[in-house]
Amino acid sequence: MKNYIIRILLLSGLLLHFSCEDYIERLPLDSPSSASFFNNRTEVDMGLFGCYERIVNRIGIKGNLPWIVSLDCTTDINWNRSATQVAQLGNGTASSENLSARNVWRDFYAVIARTNFLLDNLDNAIETVDPVYLAQVSAEARFLRAYSYFYLSEFFGGVPLITASIKIEESQMPRTSKSEIANWIIAEMDEVAPDLPINFDGNMTGRATRVAAYFLKAYTALTNERWQVAAQAAKTAIDLGYYDLHPDYAELFTYDGETSRERIFAMQYMVGLNVHPTFREFGSRLAAGVSNEKPTLAFVDSYECIDGLPIDKSPLFDPSDPFTNRDPRLHMTVAVPGTIHLGFQFETHPDSLQVWNYNTSPPARVNNTDATNPFATFTNFLWRKWMDERDLGKTQENDGDIILMRFAELLLIYAEAKIELNELDDSVFDALNRVRNRVGMPDVPRTSSQSELRTIVRRERKVELAMEGRRLIDIRRWRIAEKVMNGPRYGNSKTEFLSQAPVLDENTIPDYSGIPNVGILRVVETMVFDPNKHYLWPIHPVELQTNTALEQNPGW
């Protein structure tokens, strides 16, 4: 099924190129002149999969790195060492002409343009295509359009809401408020969900399902503090019953996890058609990666100990051996010194001039470029998530699918919404514990208060969903971005450990100021965050000049 979908994606790209590419890429300012498309099932599929293709391949936040993964470059959990446009969004140095922000606006509106064109012309296929399938296609297109508006409104606030192809003379359009867009998305998902299947054959996750629609409804409601709507939509999706947690958290993000029933919606790739360079960007120097994206110390210190207590409260935490007795997700998500990563012994101490390569038989000693290369990890850590040893030797041609929605997050959305409603029944604890127990973490105490549960669910989102593009929206909606995106961004020392744990607040934000030897930490950059400006991205001046009804976001 994956092969079929991606081949259709290629054909749909050719169709759009030869028929309306010049027009499509200019939308929403223009629309295709031809109304002759979509006369049969093949053309309908090409048009639909062309909309999916835009989501997968051409949301240009950071080169060809999958866009949803790139989002965490703008947060406190990941550091991008290059002076890229997306890194500037993360450290507070971006200007209104930032190209990553511009690309996101342009590219999501291109998705919207494609969906509008398809929806405007589906009636051409009424006499040749099963009406039930046409209804499903319409629902999928409307899902993709709403999905695009969700991210546009989260990044920029209110944006023009365009639900049909428009002409140039109709292009001067003011913003629709973020709350109105949220209402529209919620209503759209209620309308389209019945026309979507609960799942596709073969656990194929590249197309929108009924569960994906309820997920989007729940997530939209959550980020707009519609707690009751979020809880009910998440419960509806959960109760449909098809999706479940994958038994192996680490495996979920590898090729072996691609058919897991935890994956609800994903971007699909295939060598020879569309690939991504995640291995190169995340990989160690020894594995021919460039270690460009790296976990921060503040993120690593967010993981609890195996007793379910944070490191500043757990008797199991040993500052001289800080990575032992920790939440197993730490070692499934992050490579720390002293472990095996991608078949190599991972050491960063400058005296570790040679290490073992276990990819050969017998293992061999090799020069340790993870310690000696000046552009190896600056923070002392690397990402394990999304890494698979089967990509060794093809660092820029990875075709592992990238998750956009999964079942564990549905449980966390449900739990958070119920916590905010202060409806602390068994279902809240059951949802949290299902996520935690999957990796062997203990149950949340049933005596936990609303404020204690709020801390727990926020920490769970931080560690469970790392490098899945959720953190930026979370720190914005919780209004903690000015706390986590201001001041020094720390990497760990390569030669010694801190003498004690940092103090962690109710949002699991570490405070290192009281540690006697805090001076050993490496400051990889200093961040700036202006709460009057940086809670929204800028609208590029070209967009303001093109559509004079738009107004720039405050401070930009």
Image: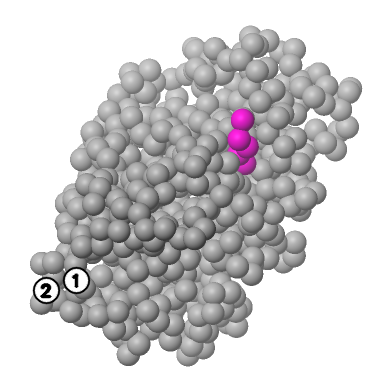
Looking at the image, residue 477 lies above or below residue 505:
above
Q: Is residue 269 magenta?
A: yes
Mark 2: secondary structure? loop
Crowding at label 2, few (<14), some or many (≥20) Cα neighbours within 10 Å?
A: some
In 3D space, how far apart are the residues under numbered discs 1 and 2 (Cα atoms)?
10 Å
Horizontal and vertical percent position of residue 187:
63, 47
Q: Number of marks in the image?
A: 2
Question: Where is the C terminus found, in terms of image quarters?
Answer: top left
Answer with left or right where residue 19 lies relative to residue 464. Answer: right
Residue at 52 percent across and 26 percent down: it is 110
The reply to whether callout 1 and callout 2 are in contact (CB within 8 Å) is: yes
Q: Which mark is residue 298?
A: none
Horizontal and vertical percent position of residue 132:
85, 38
Residue at 30 percent across and 77 percent down: it is 322
Q: Where are the magenta residues, as a range?
A: 268-272
Residue at 41 percent across and 30 percent down: it is 103
Coloring applied to the structure:
one colour
Residue at 47 percent across and 74 percent down: it is 328
Horizontal and vertical percent position of residue 155:
40, 42
Q: Which mark is residue 496?
A: 1
Please name which of the two marks, 1 or 2, marks the residue nearer to the observer: 1
Answer with left or right where residue 260 lies relative to residue 181. Answer: right
Instruction: Specify the principal SS of the magenta part.
Output: loop
Q: Which mark is residue 517?
A: 2
Looking at the image, residue 479 lies above or below residue 541:
below
Tag 1: amino acid: Glu
Horizontal and vertical percent position of residue 218:
58, 57
